[in-house]
Image (tube, coloured by chain):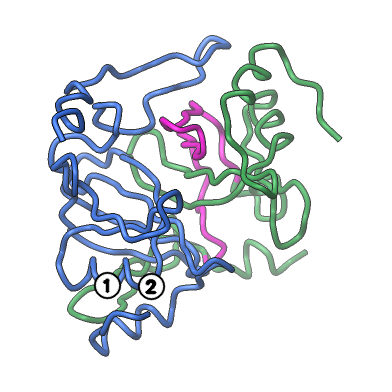
Chain colours: A green, B blue
Amino acid sequence: MNQPVTPAAAALLEAIRFDGAGLVPAIAQQHDSGEVLMLAWMNRDAIAETLATGRVCYFSRGRGRLWRKGEISGQEQRLVEMRLDCDGDTVLLLVDQIGVACHTGRRSCFYRAFRDDALAEIAAPLVDPAALYGAR
Amino acid sequence: MNQPVTPAAAALLEAIRFDGAGLVPAIAQQHDSGEVLMLAWMNRDAIAETLATGRVCYFSRGRGRLWRKGEISGQEQRLVEMRLDCDGDTVLLLVDQIGVACHTGRRSCFYRAFRDDALAEIAAPLVDPAALYGAR
C-alpha cells in the first residue's frame, strides 16, 4: 500500500534504489553539529511521510511497520534536508534531533569506539532510558 | 576464509552483528569536518584488514570481493577511529579522506538534495572522473 505522494516526491522516490526488501539505509546527522546520530531503514512510505510531514519516519525491520522516531520516547527528529548518494542506494537525513537519538539515552547511537585495542564507551547517557520508555 | 586478527580485533568483531550475507553497513565521515562522505559495506575480513593496516577496506557487493578504497583512483581513506552503534549493526568510520570519496569526482557521495520540491545537485566535481579512472 503506497501513501499518496506529490509529483516532486515521486520523482525523488524514482531516483532511489530500494533493496530487495524495499528498504534503503538512512543516516541521520544533526544538521548543525555534523554529529552522526544513527542509521535506520526507510521504505517508500517512510520517505513519503517524512517529506510530507517534516518529521522523520523510518521503517522498523524488527516490528515490520512504520516507526515515527520518538513516537514513544518523544525524542523526535525534524527533517532539515534529505540527500541522496551517487548511486541512489543510501539516504542522508540532515535532522534536528529533539533530545537524544539512542534508546540507551545517549545523544548518538555510535557511543562505542575501538581505542587502545579495546571497545570503549565514549559517551554517557544524558537521560535515563526508563524516563524515555519506562512509564508507558 | 578469515584473515588472522588480534585478540582485541576479535573482541570487536564479536560485538558486530553482521547481516545474513555477513556484511555490515559502514558510514565514512571525515574526522575533522564532520562531512558524511559515503556508505559502503564491510565483512569480517574488511574490518580486520582496516584495523590492521589503518587504511579503509570495504567489501564490494557488486564485485564480490574486498575493495581497498582508492586502489584504482588513489583516493584512499585513512582510518582515524572505528565506532560501533548501540545494537552493533552499523559501523561509523572516522577517516581522513585523500582527495575525493565519490567516483563522480565529488568530495562526498551525497551531492544530491531534495530542495524546493526537486532533486538538486549541491556539489560539483572537484576532479574529472576520467583522471581518476580513465588512464588505466
The segment highlighted magenta reads A76-104
Amino acid type of disc 1? Answer: Phe
Does the magenta-highlighted stretch encompass residue B129?
A: no
Where is mark 2, residue-wise? Answer: B44
| Real-space CA distance between mark 1 and mark 2, rounded to the nearest whole angstrom | 15 Å
Residue under pointer 1: A114
**Residue at disc 1, secondary structure:** strand
Q: Quadrant of residue A29?
A: top left
Residue occupying the point 49% across, 40% down: A90
The quadrant of the picture occupied by the C terminus of chain B is top left
Quarter of image, res A56: top right
Of badges 1 and 2, nearer the viewer stands: 2
Q: Chain of mark 1?
A: A
Q: Please give left or right for residue A106 compared with residue B128 in the image.
A: right
* Side of A80 relative to A59 (left or right): left
Horizontal and vertical percent for residue B127? 17, 23
Q: Residues within 10 Å of mark 2 (few under 14, many from 20)?
A: many
